[in-house]
Image (spheres, rainbow, N blue to C red):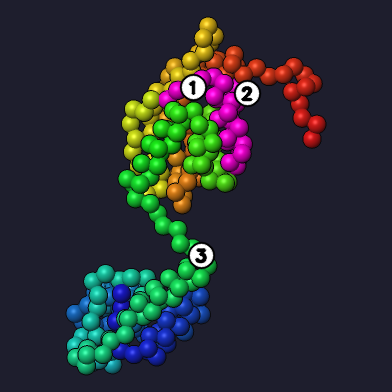
């Protein structure tokens, strides 16, 4: 954060910084404080070049006038220890009047989000963890309608392997149809571990089929769930034994013979 004496000075120096960044090289020499490690005008770190303090934003040393002005600057202008890109605070030290442009900018952003309907927030890790726990409880109940309620409308579900059900399922309806097919294999899941942050939930579980007198699969799976707005936005599935999974799916979900298996589109 850099502190300036008035708004006009702030606006002028912002324009100068932008002009220099665009390569027009019209920035005047920077004003530095002898007790600060940053350029007062632009908030850039100072470096030593040829025994002189130089501002990285313009690579220009102090002028004699600047050196004479620096003690006054050191008294009137204070530097924040944590520079913040895009945030300015105009402050008259000792006069008791201050204006935080950061507060104004923050209010403007908040207003725009409200007007645009962007009220979504990142859920806490515990909220995301509970959501996936509830999802598995719904899956165990066999209620596929309840399971689908956890899906975002544009969900992506990635199934690994080389078998009839492999590939990326796109959209809530297609993912729900995939789960309907899994139901025919009488699949069950038993959670082993579950970790989460604000955007992702990673679970490890035992997953097995339970078909009487037919081929079955029983292995460990890892799923990475991406969470947005309280819904599963994306899921990536990883199998501990992909070869066993492929073998099972080929036996349990047979393709129609040609030409019936091909679409007409």
Residue sitting nearer the eye, 124 or 74? 124
Q: Residue 195: x percent and y percent? A: 33, 38
Q: In x, y percent, where is residue 245? A: 51, 19
User: What kind of element bears circle 3?
Assistant: loop
Q: Is residue 177 magenta?
A: yes
Q: Is residue 197 visible?
A: no
Residue found 40% across the figure and 91% down from its top: 8
Q: Does residue 96 sit above or below 221 in this rendering? A: below
Instruction: Between label 2 and label 1, give the one nearer the viewer.
Output: 1
Residue 111 vertical placement versus 149 (above, below): below
Residue 128 within the magenta-colored segment of the rendering = no
Q: Secondary structure at mark 1?
A: loop
Q: Is residue 3 left or right of residue 14?
A: left
Q: Which residues are magenta?
A: 162-189
Q: Which residue is mark 2?
A: 164
In this orientation, does residue 10 appear?
A: yes
Q: Residue 193: which quarter of the image?
A: top left
Q: Kindly report which numbered mark, 2 or 3, lies closer to the viewer in this rendering.
A: 3
* Label 1 Cα neighbours within 10 Å, binned few <14 / some 14-19 / many ≥20: many
In this picture, residue 197 sits left or right of residue 138 = left
* Precedes in sequence: disc 2 or disc 3: 3
Q: Secondary structure at mark 2?
A: loop
- The quadrant of the image that shows the N terminus is bottom left
Q: Mark 2 or mark 1, which has the lower sequence index?
A: 2
Residue that carries the numbered disc 1 in the rendered image: 187
Nearest to the observer: residue 51 or residue 54 = 54
Residues at marks 3 and 1, CA–CA distance in whole angstroms: 40 Å
Query: Left or right of 128: which side holds 166?
Result: right
Q: CA distance from mark 2 to mark 3?
A: 41 Å
* Residue that mark 3 sits on: 117
Estimate the x, y position of residue 80 in percent, counting from the top left: 25, 75
């Amino acid at each position: 954060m850099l502190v300036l004496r008035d708004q006009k000075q702030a606006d002028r120096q912002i324009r100068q910084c932008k002009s220099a960044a665009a390569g027009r090289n019209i920035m005047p020499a920077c004003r530095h404080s002898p007790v600060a490690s940053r350029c007062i005008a632009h908030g850039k770190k100072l470096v030593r070049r040829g025994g002189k303090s130089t501002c990285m934003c313009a690579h220009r040393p102090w002028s004699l006038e600047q050196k004479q002005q620096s003690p006054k600057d050191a008294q009137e202008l204070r530097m924040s220890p944590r520079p913040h890109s895009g945030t300015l605070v105009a402050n008259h030290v000792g006069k008791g009047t201050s204006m935080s442009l950061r507060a104004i900018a923050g209010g403007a952003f908040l207003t725009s989000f409200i007007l645009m309907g962007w009220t979504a927030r990142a859920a806490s890790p515990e909220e995301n963890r509970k959501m996936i726990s509830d999802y598995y409880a719904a899956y165990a109940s066999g209620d596929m309608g309840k399971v689908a309620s956890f899906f975002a409308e544009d969900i992506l579900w990635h199934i690994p392997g080389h078998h009839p059900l492999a590939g990326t399922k796109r959209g809530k309806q297609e993912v729900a149809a995939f789960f309907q097919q899994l139901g025919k294999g009488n699949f069950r899941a038993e959670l082993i571990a579950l970790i989460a942050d604000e955007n992702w939930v990673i679970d490890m579980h035992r997953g097995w089929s339970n078909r009487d007198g037919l081929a079955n699969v029983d292995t460990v799976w890892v799923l990475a769930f991406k969470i947005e707005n309280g819904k599963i936005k994306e899921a990536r599935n990883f199998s501990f034994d992909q070869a066993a999974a492929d073998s099972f799916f080929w036996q349990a979900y047979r393709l129609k013979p040609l030409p019936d298996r091909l679409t007409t589109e």
